[in-house]
Amino acid sequence: MICLGRDFEALASTPFSREFEIKYGWILILPKAGGISALHSYTFQKHLVIRTSKEFLLNLLQRLQSAGPKRILALDGGGIRGALTLGYLKRIEDILRKSHGRRDLVLADYFDLIGGTSTGAIIAAALATGMSAHEVEAIYLDFGGEVFNDRQDSLGLPRLGLLRGRYNAEPLRRKLKEYFGDRTLGDSSIRTGLCIVTKRADTNSTWPLLNHPEGRYYEKNRPILLRRAVRASTAAPTYFDPEKLNIGGGVRGAFVDGGVSLHNNPALLLFLIATLKGFPFRWPTGEGKLLLVSVGTGYWNEASSFDRVMNARLWNWASSVPSMLMDDATWLNQLLLQYLAASPTATAIDSEVGSLGDDLLGDQPALTYLRYNALLEEGALRELGLGELALRAEQLRDMSRAESRHDLNLIGTKAANRMVDDVHFSPKFDVRCS
């Protein structure tokens, strides 16, 4: 992060290039006319502020181990419905830019750990490399149109869903390479903590791939290409074939979508990763010490009819059981976090426990927890002023329907404007410069 303050004002008056150290690394100040290339540059009055290359980049380990409040962003899986998530992320980014007085602030500047599952992993990785939410939105809307449109293999033959994944993974691989290139999980261009949630199917184990330099498996995982890690997290069974990853020592693993676990909503997992001693972060807990922001991809509560359930055939159950289990895991995530946290966005879990307003596990909240998600039901969409889309509520829930991505993004934007309030982001979690 680059912080501009009184030190900058003093140095900006000098006619020469100057370097000075601030809390999060080094910046270089020189007259605007100076010809120099760098990774990132920002214009301020008559001078150019340059974030220099590798040796002067933000020290990730220093950031992750520094004292002070820590902030986590958790992004759900949900296929093309990730377009809805981005509506919320734009709103959050705009609020933080205003509160910090920085029009160039990106979410990687604010959040110390960004993690995601499946489509959430795509967005998390892009944000962690310093893209703004607005930039990721433009990329994602282009990206989704290609990834979920190719139902044929390289020979032009229809892919048989009973034998292989429904979609050809090559467009996904191609797009991930276009946006992430040959960056690895340990690449210095990743500006903050990153967690990509995937599932190793051959050992039936959930793998949170981390970029923390002191992680137990960091040296083995560091060379993994970021695009391959993201591809592994998005390899939803029946939609895409598994991804093979070399995991060190000549061993290969077969990886599938991280949603094939309890962590399609990765919020609780990220809280555990941030605080348990078995992981390298070991951040202190407390209402003013740890902020967890969790963003979903849309949900619905509409029940099936009695007759429809009783008359269901085997194939009906085969398609509905995975989503039933994922929904239960998501609500359990939310229940436990509301039980542990101070949560200004707490919502009713069910008709028995409600929003847990009078329940707290322990004497003090372990964190501040914010959960944002949009209801994809006809009535809720009408309340957002989206009457036309309300008629297609059921259609919008399909996580592989690429043509819905712009509508989903609009829903996320409208819902975020109603739900995400600047008072949710307390000044005690502001990123401060020294």
Image (cartoon, helix red, strand yellow):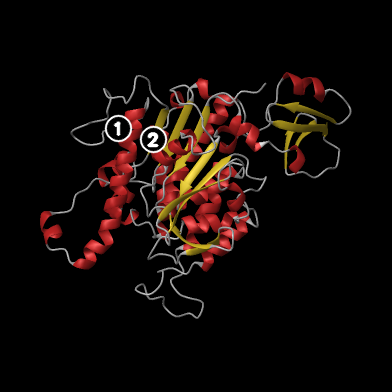
Tell me which residue sits at (43%, 37%) in the image: 272
Q: Mark 2 and 1 residues: CB-CB less than 8 Å, in contact?
A: yes
Find the residue positioned furthest to the right.
Answer: 15
Viewport quadrant of the C terminus: top right
Instruction: Looking at the picture, tell me which residue is in the foreground, 371 or 198.
Output: 198
Q: Which mark is residue 371?
A: 2
Instruction: Looking at the picture, tell me which residue is in the foreground, 262 or 231.
Output: 262
Q: Which mark is residue 403?
A: none
- The amino acid on which the numbered mark 2 sits, given as a three-letter code, is Arg
Label 2 SS: strand
Label 1 Cα crowd, 10 Å radius (few <14 / some 14-19 / many 20+): some
Tell me which residue sits at (27%, 30%) in the image: 355
Tell me which residue sits at (29%, 41%) in the image: 380
Residue 5 percent across, percent down from the top left: 70, 21
Left or right of residue 99: residue 362: left
Residue 63 percent across, percent down from the top left: 62, 32
Left or right of residue 322: residue 189: right
Left or right of residue 86: residue 101: right
Residue 31 percent across, percent down from the top left: 84, 33
The correct choice, above or below, for 240 with respect to 115 in the image is below
The correct choice, above or below, for 276 with respect to 166 in the image is above
Q: Which residue is mark 1?
A: 347
> Is residue 418 in view from this perspective?
no
The correct choice, above or below, for 170 with respect to 211 in the image is below
